Amino acid sequence: MIKAKSKLLSLYIHWPYCESKCPYCDFNSHVNEAFDPKQWIKCYTNQLFEMREQLLNHNVNLNNLNAIFFGGGTPSLMPLEIIDSILRTASNLFGFAENVEISLEANPSSYEKDKFYDLKEIGINRLSIGVQSLNNTNLKLLGRLHNTEDAQVAVEHANKTFNNISVDLIYAFHGQKIIDWTNELKTFLRKNNLQHISLYQLTIEEGTKFFTNYKKGLFNIIDNDKAADFYEISNEILNDQNFIKYEISNHAKRGFQCKHNLNYWNSQNWMGIGPGAYGRLWSSKSNNRVEYQNFKNPKTWLSKNIYKSEFEKTNFFNNATSDIDTLTMGLRLSEGIETSKLYDESIIKSDAFKKLEEEKIITIKDGILKVSENNMIKLNSIIDLLINS
Ligand SMILES: C[S@@+](CC[C@H](N)C(=O)[O-])C[C@H]1O[C@@H](n2cnc3c(N)ncnc32)[C@H](O)[C@@H]1O
Ligand code: SF4
């Protein structure tokens, strides 16, 4: 199958520590504990060597990396020597494409003044700043350690150092007024020169403090209609400021779409190293997609990778699982998905397809399937209807 041959290749590195645990967050993040940087370097290095072996075993093209993403947790807390070592080893083992995008997530409360500059010096060329909210009441509600002033200083500081800055914001909480949010967003955009924005509606994830409070009736969520209003108006504001919405929650100025995340949504090849990280490759040998899952607990991950690299699980997708994944990821993109990417297009149920097409919820043209703009907010239920009805 030619599918496997022409894929891009990127690398995700997970750093699992944060200064504190936010009450909404179900990422693999743990409050800081003592660690030995040398041990971490050894484990990340072993994983990079192992991934190279896996690529060779599966006859995956050893393309230069087009993107690298340090995510977390809070990777702005990572000692520079660890980041530097990972980048050097990755460059030796895989090579970097000419315009490789190297992103790192930074938290406004957890960087020292010169850290952005140092990060740039060792190769980071895109910073994703977790501003999260544009007013202090909501920052407190979200359990964040920074205030709006800290966030503004971090963004201004980043602007002096990087040409590619993204900001994460969470919105659409119970009690938030649309007028307040839109004013905050407009003011923030006027003040700052950003290339990318990720806007996430607050979700209540199982296992979080918000979830416990929600179950006890101490925390409310907004209703779907209101969430849709928040979504629509936010998209309009960003569109007016020349941001192109290229994915359900992501907006970029022309040419600044996040390359690493596009690799996920376009079902390319990526490697994932670090606690809980996962990677997926198209194997040319078995014609299947292979997924590598790392041990989630940082201590377990360290113990399993210090002498040689070991994954918690390796999954071989069958064609149907691959297709569901390709479709689910691809429909998140505003430009939609080429249905020829699927092994078997009959994964899409024809009755549901016809109905959704008649209702103009989805469109198909020249082999490209899309969810219409104003229905993106219902993406999960649309995918469910397409695959399961
Ligand atoms: C791994 S976290 C970000 C990294 C960094 N530690 C920070 O918090 O700034 C990725 C992003 O997911 C978003 N996020 C996490 N949990 C969320 C939730 N329950 N609802 C909405 N957005 C969420 C936040 O905007 C966050 O910046
Ligand atoms: S949102 Fe960011 S800072 Fe907060 S716990 Fe999650 S990863 Fe850590």
Image: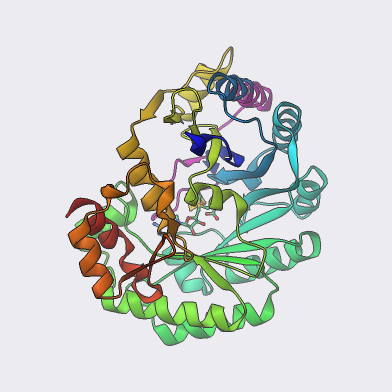
Q: Examine the image and state in which quarter residue 383 appears.
A: bottom left
Q: Nearer the viewer, residue 71 or 220?
A: 71
Q: Examine the image and state in which quarter residue 28 appears.
A: top left
Residue placed farthest to the top in the image? 307
**Residue 211 appears left or right of 13:** left
Q: Nearer the viewer, residue 337 or 247?
A: 337
Whether residue 25 appears in this view of the structure is: no
Q: Position of residue 65 (x, y in %)?
A: 67, 39
**Residue 246 appears left or right of 356:** right
Q: Quadrant of the C terminus?
A: bottom left
Residue placed farthest to the front in the image? 366
Examine the rendered structure and indicate whether residue 149 appears above or below residue 59.
below
**Residue 146 appears left or right of 113:** left
Q: Position of residue 283 (x, y in %)?
A: 49, 28
Give me the residue at 80% from left, 42% from top: 122
Give me the residue at 28% from left, 54% from top: 211
The total number of labels drawn is 0
- Snapshot colouring: rainbow
Q: Is residue 35 magenta?
A: yes
Q: Position of residue 41 (x, y in %)?
A: 67, 26
Residue placed farthest to the right in the image? 121
Q: Nearer the viewer, residue 94 or 216?
A: 94
The magenta stretch is 19-48
Examine the rendered structure and indicate whether residue 293 appears above or below residue 355.
above
Q: Nearer the viewer, residue 301 or 388?
A: 388
Give me the residue at 34% from left, 76% from top: 228
Whether residue 180 appears in this view of the structure is: yes
Examine the rendered structure and indicate whether residue 160 appears above or below residue 185.
above
Q: Position of residue 133 (x, y in %)?
A: 51, 69
Q: Is residue 24 magenta?
A: yes
**Residue 210 appears left or right of 113:** left
